[in-house]
Amino acid sequence: MVKRNALIVFFNKSNIPLCLMLLVILSSIGCAVEQHTMGSEKLRFNALIFDNHSGMMLENVSVSVQNSRAHMSCSVLLIGRSCSTSFQERNYKGNAVHITWEVDGVAYKAGPFYVTLPKMISSEQIASVVISFSSEKNVLAEFRN
């Protein structure tokens, strides 16, 4: 009963301006967070690169983007080499990716996971998506300027 009485005392007529100010402050905090994460800076990219640092030849390397028809593959990715393609500039939409590859006839897959965003997003630079293989089972996808 004491808790209910405390709430009634707090929300009486004399505290209405204080309650309204508190509501405005709390709602502006939510807007500030959304503006920060959804800021006007958009990450743009126009290339995809597979890098093979695994020490093994990779075959049938493929990436597909969830909720999209985007797909790229490379039939053979030699040790220490890259396979790349460029395309029309796109805005990053945060879709998950799925990656598949083979080593000595054994199939591997990773995903769904998300491409690692750069620390700084520059509207003046267009990034590339780089998918790096460091071993037969380890793969990393990140944006690079």
Image (spheres, rainbow, N blue to C red):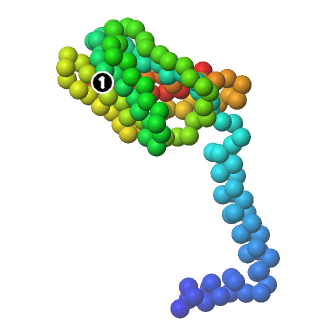
* Residue 63 on image: x %, y %: 40, 29
- The picture quadrant where one finds residue 24 is bottom right
**Residue at the spot 33% in from the left edge and 13% down from the top edge:** 76
Tell me which residue sits at (36%, 26%) in the image. 62
Q: Label 1, secondary structure: give it.
A: strand
Q: Is residue 30 left or right of residue 109?
A: right
Q: Amino acid at mark 1?
A: Trp
Judge whether 104 appears above or below 32 on screen. Answer: above
Vertical order, 43 against 50 (above or below): below
Left or right for 105, reference 115:
left
Instruction: From the image, tell me which residue sits under label 1.
Output: 101
Image quadrant assignment for residue 83: top left
Q: Residue furthest bottom?
A: 1
Mark 1, Cα crowd under 10 Å, few <14 / some 14-19 / many 20+, is many
Q: Residue at image x 26%, y 22%?
A: 102
Is 21 rendered above or below residue 77? below
Camera-side residue: 60 or 143? 60
- Asked if residue 72 is positioned above or below residue 17 in the image, the reply reads above
The C terminus lies in which quarter of the figure? Answer: top right
Decide if residue 16 is on the left or right side of residue 110: right
Residue at image location 69% in from the left, 36% down from the top: 41
